[in-house]
């Protein structure tokens, strides 16, 4: 069974239209940064996470399907990935993100290999 990596899991608790900007992002083994930008677009939902000094200011694109749980009270998002999986992910490229459909395939393919569905 293959789920859409670019859509929030029904059990995540995310309500479309709720802003996730500035929420802290928690990997399975610790904090990785905060949300800079996000989208709820059907079939293309994502988070752009600023990892700060943790991996030298890198921004990463996380497909919404990697979100395990959203805790609105704590302003935290829990993803089903380790810090190393996120560190080794393709770096966010805002130009390709907007103009290159193959970029989403590349990013989605990377995270799809690491999902525990």
Image: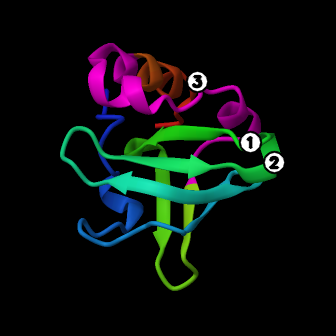
* Disc 2 packing (10 Å; few <14; some 14–19; many ≥20): few
Q: Quadrant of the N terminus?
A: top left
Q: Are marks 2 and 1 in contact (CB under 8 Å)?
A: yes
Mark 3–mark 2 Cα distance, whole angstroms, equals 16 Å
Please name the residue that numbered disc 2 is placed on: 54
Q: State the image quarter where residue 77 is shown.
A: bottom right
Residue 52 position, x and y percent, is 73, 52
Can residue 1 be seen by looking at this rendering?
A: no
* Disc 1 packing (10 Å; few <14; some 14–19; many ≥20): some
The residue positioned 27% from the left and 19% from the top of the image is: 101
Residue in the foreground of this view, choosing between 88 and 22: 22
Q: State the image quarter where residue 17 is shown.
A: bottom left
Is tag 3's residue or tag 2's residue first in the polypeptide sequence?
2
Please name the residue that numbered disc 3 is placed on: 90
Please name the residue that numbered disc 1 is placed on: 83
Q: Is residue 3 above or below residue 54?
A: above
Which residues make up the magenta segment? 79-105
């Amino acid at each position: 069974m293959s789920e859409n990596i670019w859509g929030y899991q029904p059990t995540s608790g995310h309500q479309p239209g709720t802003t996730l900007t500035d929420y802290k992002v928690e990997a399975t083994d610790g904090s990785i940064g905060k949300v800079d930008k996000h989208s709820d677009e059907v079939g293309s939902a994502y988070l752009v996470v600023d990892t700060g000094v943790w991996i030298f200011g890198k921004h990463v694109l996380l497909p919404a399907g990697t979100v395990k749980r959203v805790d609105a009270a704590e302003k935290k998002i829990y993803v089903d990935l380790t810090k190393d999986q996120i560190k080794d992910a393709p770096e966010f490229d805002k130009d390709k993100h907007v103009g290159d459909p193959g970029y989403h395939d590349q990013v989605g393919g990377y995270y799809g290999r690491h999902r525990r569905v």
